[in-house]
Every structure is written in structure tokens, then in C-alpha cells.
Amino acid sequence: MARTTKQIDARERARKARLRVDTEREQRDRNIEDAAADYFAAADNYAEVTRKLEVIEGRMRTAVKSLLDLGESQARIAALLEIDTKEVRRLRAGFDGKTKTADQSKQADSQTPVPQDTDLPTEVHGESAARLLAGSGHGG
């Protein structure tokens, strides 16, 4: 009988240990799922913001191109827009026909509205926000 009691006791301890380990595993699995869900939500948001920044960047390029077409110098455009001439050159260089034109920007705006009171910066420490995002190594 003593042996049976010890076997029952051992089996009960083993069951409790398994339940404890299973509970820890279930909590870990929930934490993994939560982290993955946070990533997917952020990735979706990142893609949306990147798309909006591309539209904004296209509008900025179009405006710079329009000023250049009106005969304004890069230095005057920089002063007018309160940006560095380096940024004017970057925006000008990006206008290669692949960049969204004003009409394309307006069409994209109607599909993906960019609020006028957006908190998205167009320039951060002299760098365009789109360029910073493009160089950050994030996928979108």
C-alpha cells in the first residue's frame, strides 16, 4: 500500500508540475501573439504613412519644379520655402518623370486623404521625412 500511495503522490506532483509548465507556456504563447500583432499593426501603419509621405513628397517636388519653371533660382526657392538649397537640389533631382505630378498627387489625395493638420513632419533636422524613412531600413 505504501508503494501505491507514493506512486499516487508522485503522479499528483507530476500533474501539478505539468499544469504549471503548461500555464507558463500558454502565457508565453499569448505574449508571442501579442508581440506579433503589435508588429503587424505597426507595419500596416508604417505602410500607410509611407504612402502618404510619398504623396506629400511628390507635391513638394512639383511645387519646387513649378518655382524653377517660373525662373526662380535655387537660392531664392530655398529662402522662399525656408529650406536649405541642398533640399531644393534633392527635390529638383527627384523630379524625373517617375515622381508624382500635381495631378497625380491630387488623384492620390482623393484616394488616400492627408489631413491638413497632419502631425507628420516634412523635414526633420534638414532631412526630408520621406528620405529618413527610406533610409531607415524598414520594409513597407
Image (spheres, rainbow, N blue to C red):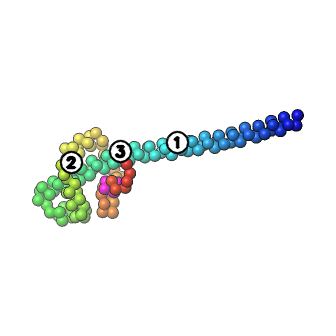
Q: Secondary structure at mark 3?
A: helix
Q: Which residue is mark 1?
A: 33
Numbered tag placed on residue 19 in the rendering: none
Q: Which residue is mark 2?
A: 98
Rendered residue at 13%/61% (across/down): 72
Furthest residue in direction front, as rendered: 3
Rendered residue at 20%/57% (across/down): 93
Q: Which residue is mark 3?
A: 48
Circle 1 packing at 10 Å, graded few (<14), some (14-19), many (20+), is few
Circle 3 packing at 10 Å, graded few (<14), some (14-19), many (20+), is some
In this orientation, does residue 99 appear? Answer: yes
- Measured in 3D between alpha carbons, the distance from the residue under mark 1 to the one under mark 2, in whole angstroms, is 40 Å
Left of 79 or right of it: where is 50? right
Spot occupied by residue 21 in the image (x, y as percentages of width and height):
66, 42
Q: Nearer the N terminus, badge 1 or badge 3?
A: 1
- Measured in 3D between alpha carbons, the distance from the residue under mark 1 to the one under mark 3, in whole angstroms, is 23 Å
Query: In front here: 62 or 80?
Result: 62
Circle 2 packing at 10 Å, graded few (<14), some (14-19), many (20+), is few
* Magenta residues (range): 129-133
Numbered disc in front, either 3 or 2: 2
Numbered disc in front, either 1 or 3: 1
In this orientation, does residue 63 appear? Answer: no
Q: Amino acid at mark 1?
A: Glu
- Measured in 3D between alpha carbons, the distance from the residue under mark 3 to the one under mark 2, in whole angstroms, is 20 Å
Spot occupied by residue 32 in the image (x, y as percentages of width and height):
54, 44
Rendered residue at 11%/59% (across/down): 71
Q: Secondary structure at mark 2?
A: loop
